[in-house]
Image (spheres, helix red, strand yellow):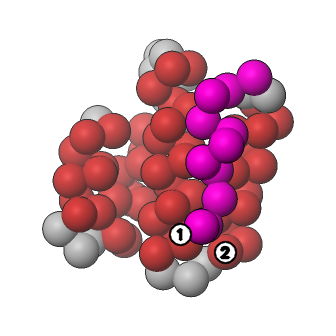
Amino acid sequence: MFYYAESTRQDNSTAGAIEIINRFINDKSVPADVVQPTLVLLGQCYCDINQNKKANEAFDRLRREYPDSKYIKIANCN
């Protein structure tokens, strides 16, 4: 699902990627090692469309739920 969302984003369909990700990240059966980069991808999608508040919500969720995540260092709009 992560790669499908990333592919959709690369095809200039950020809104489509956001929709896919939002259906996916709240599924409790999805492993943490998949949710973490997916939260970063969600934030980056929001950055792409200048919705920085929503981007920061995704990045903050990563920091809050996975404080030791290796993805924290790339969880930003830069």
Number of marks: 2
The answer to whether residue 53 is magenta is no
The answer to whether residue 71 is magenta is yes
Residue 47 showing in the rendered view: yes
Position of the N terminus, as image quadrant, is top left
The location of residue 58, given as percent across then percent down, is 65, 52
Left or right: 30 as drawn, with respect to 69: left
Find residue 63 and report its image quarter. top right
Mark-to-mark CA distance, 2 and 1: 6 Å
Q: Earlier in the sequence, mark 2 or mark 1?
A: 1
Amino acid type at mark 2: Asn
- Looking at the picture, tell me which residue is in the foreground, 52 or 24: 52
User: Which residue occupies the extreme bottom position in the image?
Assistant: 50
Position of the C terminus, as image quadrant, is bottom right
- Looking at the picture, tell me which residue is in the foreground, 65 or 73: 73
Q: Is residue 15 above or below residue 68?
A: below
Q: Which residues are magenta?
A: 68-78
Q: Disc 2 designates what residue?
A: 52
Q: Disc 1 designates what residue?
A: 46
Classified by dominant secondary structure, the portion drawn in magenta counts as loop
Q: Dot 2: few (<14), some (14–19), or many (≥20) neighbours within 10 Å?
A: some
For label 1, the SS is: helix
Residue drawn at point x = 72 percent, y = 72 percent: 53
Residue drawn at point x = 25 percent, y = 40 percent: 3
For label 2, the SS is: helix
Q: Is residue 48 above or below residue 6?
A: below
Residue 26 showing in the rendered view: no
Q: Are marks 2 and 1 in contact (CB under 8 Å)?
A: yes
Amino acid type at mark 1: Tyr
Q: Dot 1: few (<14), some (14–19), or many (≥20) neighbours within 10 Å?
A: many
Residue drawn at point x = 79 percent, y = 28 percent: 67
